[in-house]
Image (cartoon, grey):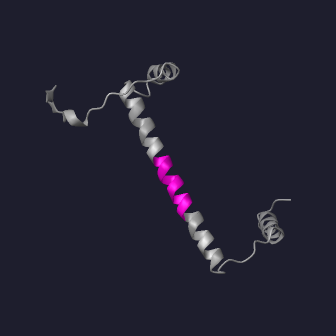
Amino acid sequence: MLTDGLVIDEEAIMSVTIPADLSPHVDMLISTGNYASTDAVVRDALTKLLERHHRVELLRLSIQDGIAEYERGECTPFDFAEMKRKAREAWLAEGNS
């Protein structure tokens, strides 16, 4: 299909219905000028959702790695008092009081 000089793959087009409770939010985003269309809002929202899913997956993998390290006995106990002491020393070394 050719539209305004652009070749569009009709199979790549998907129709999405925006629920009535979200429609005013989409309209507001468009009215600010940050988005040109509903398509742009949905595209950005989906992109951010995919990025979030990616970050959650990385976190999940990191947690699994930490659990595996713990199970292999590769972890040392966390000393909160020591961490607090070092942070305070660093803060004081910067000239804070």
Image check: 84 left or right of 65?
right
Overall secondary structure of the magenta section: helix
Residue 48 forms part of the magenta stretch: no
Give the answer, above or below, for where 43 lies relative to 87: above
Identify the residue at the far front of this view: 71
Q: Which residues are magenta?
A: 51-61
Quadrant (top left/top right/bottom left/bottom right) for the N terminus:
top left
Along the viewing direction, whichever of 64 and 84 lies nearer the viewer: 64
Q: Position of residue 41 (x, y in %)?
A: 42, 30
Query: In the picture, residue 13 is in which quadrant?
Result: top left
The verdict on residue 52 being magenta is yes
Where in the figure is residue 60, as x and y percent of width and height?
A: 55, 59
In the visual, does 87 lie left or right of 52? right
The quadrant the C terminus occupies is bottom right
Residue 77 location in percent, x, y?
75, 75
User: Image check: 39 left or right of 57?
Assistant: left
Find residue 18 and report its image quarter: top left
* In front of the other: 33 or 1: 1
| Number of numbered tags placed on the structure image | 0
Residue, x 56% and y 58% (percent of image)?
59
Q: Is residue 89 above or below residue 58?
A: below
- Residue drawn at x 42%, y 39% is 46
> Looking at the image, which residue sits at the far bottom?
73
Q: Nearer the viewer, residue 2 or 31?
A: 2
Question: Residue shown at 62%/70% (left/top)?
Answer: 67
Q: Position of residue 12 (x, y in %)?
A: 25, 37
User: In front here: 34 or 66?
Assistant: 66
